[in-house]
Image (spheres, rainbow, N blue to C red):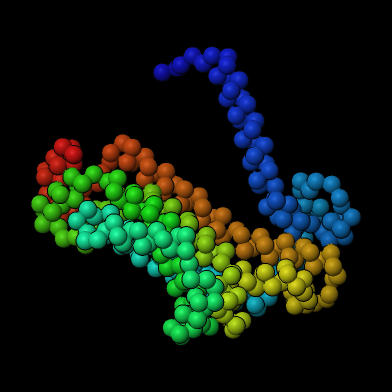
Amino acid sequence: MKTHRSVAEKVFDIVNICILIVIMIAASYPLLYIIFSSLSVPSQLAGYNNILYRPLGLQFDAYYAVLHNKPILIGYRNTIVYTIVGTSLNLIFTTTLAYALSRRGLMLRNSLMIMIVITMFFSGGLIPTYLVMKQLGIVNTWISMVFPGLIGTYNLIIMRTYFQSIPEALEESARIDGASEMKIMVRIMIPLSMPIIAVMILYYGVGHWNSWFNASIYLTKSSLYPLQLVLRNILVTGNTDDLLTSLGTIKGRDMSEIVKSAAIVIATVPILVLYPFLTEVFRQGCHDRRNKRIRIPNGFAQDSFFNLHCSG
């Protein structure tokens, strides 16, 4: 049905759109600048002082140099492993604990939550944490990249709150059908929680992908370095000789800056590609919940499941 909009509402929409366009340009320009500069010809970019809105010329030497550099390729491999393994473990532990803390019948539930929330404001500090990791024998191993921060307190609270928002009638009806606590969590609660799980994958995944601080503290073997630490060392020290050597000749400072831009683009693109898929899962999950499209898991009696859900 077509609705009539007043002049004031149309003006408000136009102003909103203009503001959002300005914010979008301001937020995306730094990344666009890096992409354009990585594709530009060094000699043309060196003398250019205006706003860069397109590549100045076109060359792919910088990407060739980055993709043929062994430390970067090793860092890429390590980062992919840390991100996949770390995010999987984060999801398993966070989901399990959040579900347990969302159950009203859990003994000492409030006391456990208070102790967990305290860790958001107080921590042991860097040196005590390092000593604990050393005593556990995980310093200089890949485990040190996934074990600290296995459960994020903030993410745990978000998931717990989401589980509590799911109608208890679903749980009660599943129990009537003979489901155990584990079966309720795996086959009912988790499928209904895909939007928040998508958000957790995004939070934890981006965190692991961009992580370099833990690696700088716990790792000394360069073969275990994640990509971000390799790039940080290149950007901080400014030493790109190894990268430029793969081009067969040292091409000077101008080429060095472009190679740095190419390295940043290659490190950023994978997580940008992942983002739209997670957004779609989040949007679809919210749409299903808003329209109450609850899929009845196989093996449960549909009558009791549906009736109790509706009565709730």
| Residue 86 visible somewhere in the drawing | yes
Q: Quadrant of the N terminus?
A: top left
The quarter holding residue 10 reads: top right
Left or right, 148 with respect to 45, comes to left
Whole-percent x, y for residue 174 in the image: 15, 52
Whole-percent x, y for residue 238 in the image: 77, 71
The quarter holding residue 152 reads: bottom left
Tell me what residue is drawn at x 11 percent, y 43 percent. Answer: 303
Tell me what residue is drawn at x 87 percent, y 58 percent. Answer: 46
| Residue 81 visible somewhere in the drawing | no
Tell me what residue is drawn at x 14 percent, y 42 percent. Answer: 308
Tell me what residue is drawn at x 75 percent, y 73 percent. Answer: 237
In the image, is residue 25 above or below residue 185? above
Whole-percent x, y for residue 15 in the image: 63, 26
Left or right, 129 with respect to 302, comes to right
The quarter holding residue 120 reads: bottom left
Left or right, 119 with respect to 13, comes to left
Whole-percent x, y for residue 220 in the image: 60, 83
